[in-house]
Amino acid sequence: GLSRILRALPMVPGIDFAGTVRSSASPDFQPGDKVVLTGWGVGESWSGGFAQRARVKGEWLVKLPEGLSSSQAMAIG
């Protein structure tokens, strides 16, 4: 009950992630798009980036800039 990050249990931790869109209802993203997510309460109030798959709101995502790998994006944080 003293966690400063996780707001509810059970919860998948991880406050950010990078990955590939599998499907999307958002007109901003298509399957195959590389994306990054940081913040928005992910890993605190919503299950987070240590999950193998995540379903999140499209407005939380940012397209991964060209020339930047997912690993590089996560190293920047």
Image (cartoon, grey):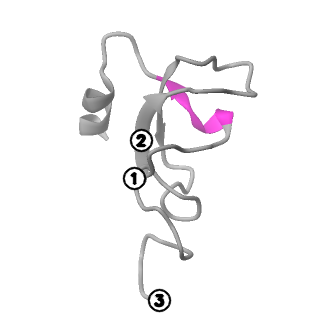
Camera-near label (3 vs 1) is 1
Q: Is residue 11 magenta?
A: no
Camera-near label (2 vs 1) is 1
Q: Is residue 3 left or right of residue 70?
A: right
Q: Secondary structure at mark 2?
A: strand
Q: Residue farthest to the top? A: 66
Asked if residue 71 is positioned above or below residue 54 in the image, the reply reads above
Residue 48 lies, in percent from the top left, at 48, 54
Amino acid type at circle 3 is: Gly
The quarter of the picture where the C terminus appears is top left
Q: Quadrant of residue 73?
A: top left
Asked if residue 28 is positioned above or below residue 46 in the image, the reply reads above
Q: Residue farthest to the bottom? A: 1
Amino acid type at circle 2 is: Phe
Nearer-N-terminus badge (3/1)? 3
Residue 49 lies, in percent from the top left, at 43, 49
Q: Which residue is mark 1?
A: 50
- For label 3, the crowd category at 10 Å Cα-Cα, with few meaning under 14, some 14 to 19 and many 20 or more, is few
The residue that appears at 31% across and 11% down in the rendered structure is 67
Nearer-N-terminus badge (2/3)? 3
Q: Which residue is mark 2?
A: 17
Q: Is residue 45 left or right of residue 26?
A: left
Whole-angstrom CA distance, mark 3 to mark 1, is 21 Å
Residue 21 lies, in percent from the top left, at 55, 26
Q: Which mark is residue 19?
A: none
How many badges with numbers are in the image? 3
Residue extent of the magenta highlight: 58-63
Q: Which residue is mark 3?
A: 1
Circles 2, 1 touching at the beta carbon (< 8 Å): no
